Amino acid sequence: MLEVKLHDIGEGMTEGEVIHYLVKVGDSVMTDQPLVEVQTDKMVAELTSPCSGIVKEIRIEVGQTVQVGTSLLYIEIDEAARADRKSHVETKQSAEKKAIPSIKLGEKSPHMPFKRVLAAPYTRKIARDNNINIEDVKASDSSGRITEDDVFRFLQGKQADTEPNKDSRLTEVSQEIPNEIPFRGIRKKIAEKMTKSLFTIPHVTHFDEVNMTNLFKMREQLKADGESVSVSAFLIKALVISLKDFPIFNAELDEENNRILLKKNYHIGIATNTESGLIVPVIHDVDKKSIKEINQDVKELTAKAIAGKLRPFEMQNSTFTVSNVGPLGSTGATPIINYPETALIAFHKTKKQPIVNEQDEIVIGHIMTLSMAFDHRVADGGTAIAFTNRFASLIEQPHKLMMEMI
């Protein structure tokens, strides 16, 4: 009998919440088949079977939070499979590669009785709450990812290729909204971390404006030359240069030892809005990367966060966090610091508005607002203002930003 335990999915993890079992007692399982979904403080992860066999006992109930090392379930090992694995590992792997035909997304294979469905945990929950086998739901997205709308359509006896009209769809959704939402998983972890941050750190928020006009012109020139780079990549690069000039904001307060730790690495967290909640993937060693490389990292990590495919190390060790909420329509906010960091900066909507240029002429400019929350135990308002002034100068005069990278 083999114990399947909650193991350390990521650095520093101590506990996890069991949110859904993908198997039940009596099921036959194969090696690497997903068994259970576990919520950590940063992600939803699937624990897979270490062997082939039969599920004999499930020890921990859904909704329970347990420590790393706790036994979740027991599997009776398939002895024949274990003996074969020990004596013919390489042969077996080679044979499987030849024997398993290519499988299109959504198809089942005789060698793979379980089906991997692309869907967010909340989408899976909607399906479970309505007694729907999510494998039966057809995805409307070309990527094969099942959405909440796909599940609601299935509830009405319709599939993705039969799109209901807007009014009826709104009615369907309103009928299916529950009158209560379980407070657990990522939502609960976010609440715990935000509460700790707000009640531990004396927050101060500094607001400022940045003239984006020249940066936008430079981006248009790059586009004309076949180079498409997001505004975020420029903002992040300018931030790291500014953090090197003001290292107090790339720091962590160690109260126990009465010291402020100035971090030598520049790992930038990117606050990302997903179906499951706020996720913060991390771009590591930003100071060593070009704007083009940063742009690629932002795209890849954001896509992974939305799809729920981030690996643990891609969400660890951030030293400063950025929240780009401008595309959502935000004009201002008082953000909460990503504890135990010292500061967080939020970029808000960029608006066209009249400005006075250096020749005292009234022209139309692109003005972005930002809000910077910082730990008043570690830094003061004057330092925060100097920091954002340095950042703004790099963005407003992009040639200075280029010079800093030479």
Image: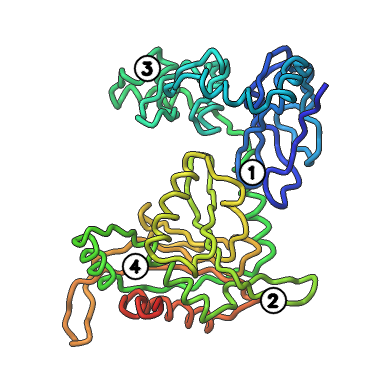
Type of residue at label 4?
Met
The residue beneath circle 1 is 188
Type of residue at label 3?
Gln
Decide which of tag 3 and tag 1 comes sooner along the chain.
3
Type of residue at label 1?
Lys
Residue mark closest to the camera, 4 vs 2: 2
How far apart marks 4 and 3 lie (CA) works out to: 43 Å
How far apart marks 3 and 1 lie (CA) works out to: 33 Å
Q: Of helix, strand and loop, which one carries label 1?
A: helix
Decide which of tag 2 and tag 1 comes sooner along the chain.
1
Residue drawn at x 66%, y 46% is 41
Q: Is residue 44 left or right of residue 390?
A: right
How far apart marks 4 and 2 lie (CA) works out to: 32 Å
Picture coordinates of residue 207 (x, y %)?
44, 72
Q: Is residue 6 left or right of residue 140?
A: right
The residue beneath circle 3 is 159
The residue beneath circle 4 is 368
Front one among 102 and 202: 102
Give the vertical position of 118 relative to 185 (above or below): above
Residue drawn at x 63%, y 39% is 185
The residue beneath circle 2 is 260
Residue drawn at x 59%, y 65% is 319
Where does the C terminus fall, quadrant-wise?
bottom left
Picture coordinates of residue 192 (x, y %)?
67, 50
Q: Of helix, strand and loop, which one carries label 4?
A: strand
How far apart marks 2 and 3 lie (CA) works out to: 57 Å
Decide which of tag 4 and tag 2 comes sooner along the chain.
2
Front one among 92 and 262: 92
